[in-house]
Image (cartoon, rainbow, N blue to C red):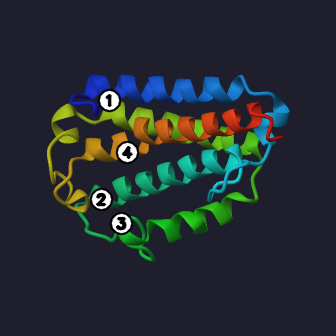
Amino acid sequence: MPRAQNKTDLVTDTKNKYEELITLINHISETDRNALFLFSDRDKNIRDVIMHLYYWHEMFFAWYNRGLDQATFKTPSEKYSWKETKLLNQDLWQEAQKYSLDEALTLLDKAYQENLNLLISIPESILFTRGYYKWTKTSHLALYFISNGPSHYEWAIKKIKKHLRELKNGNK
């Protein structure tokens, strides 16, 4: 998927990929929605994938809100560097275990709506200006929206489709 180069395309890509993800999930039987993945992965089911997206949305909101005052801080978290994302994601996975798929979908939908509203509210000149916020360093804010939105939704779609292929191939 080509990266959006303007706000209009970014909003469209975000909406389209999210809709594709939710439509995919809504067309899966209840049994297959809750089935464990048959392939080895950090995420063991669709709920884990959805909660992963939710947690990353929440981290992004925290970065954005914290960075409005031009503060500098460590991302992705105070505990982990970007090189330790695998460990961070494992912690997020552990936290996700207390939620049902329905709860996860509700949380993600709320976070998606907040993400989209925030994206729409920010002028394009700010979105695509590298280093506009200190916390983004040499990147532009749009990159975070892309990574946290359409690119992450595409990752989730591919993972869920792999799950469905495995189930279809009789590996139930």
Q: Position of residue 74 (x, y in %)?
A: 33, 71
Question: How far, Cα to Cα, is label 3 from label 2?
Answer: 11 Å
**Viewer-nearest residue: 103 or 153:** 153
- Asked if disc 2 and disc 1 are in contact, CB closer than 8 Å, the reply is no
Q: Residue at x 38, y 38 (%)?
A: 118
Which residue bears the numbered disc 1? Answer: 10
Numbered badge on residue 147: 4
Residue type at mark 3 is: Thr
Q: Nearer the viewer, mark 2 or mark 1?
A: 1
Mark 1 burial class by Cα count in 10 Å: few <14, some 14-19, many 20+: many
Q: Nearer the viewer, mark 3 or mark 2?
A: 3
Q: Nearer the viewer, mark 4 or mark 2?
A: 4
**First in sequence: mark 2 or mark 1?**
1
**First in sequence: mark 3 or mark 2?**
2
**First in sequence: mark 3 or mark 4?**
3
Numbered badge on residue 75: 3
Which residue bears the numbered disc 2? Answer: 67
Vertical placement of residue 81 versus 43, above or below = below
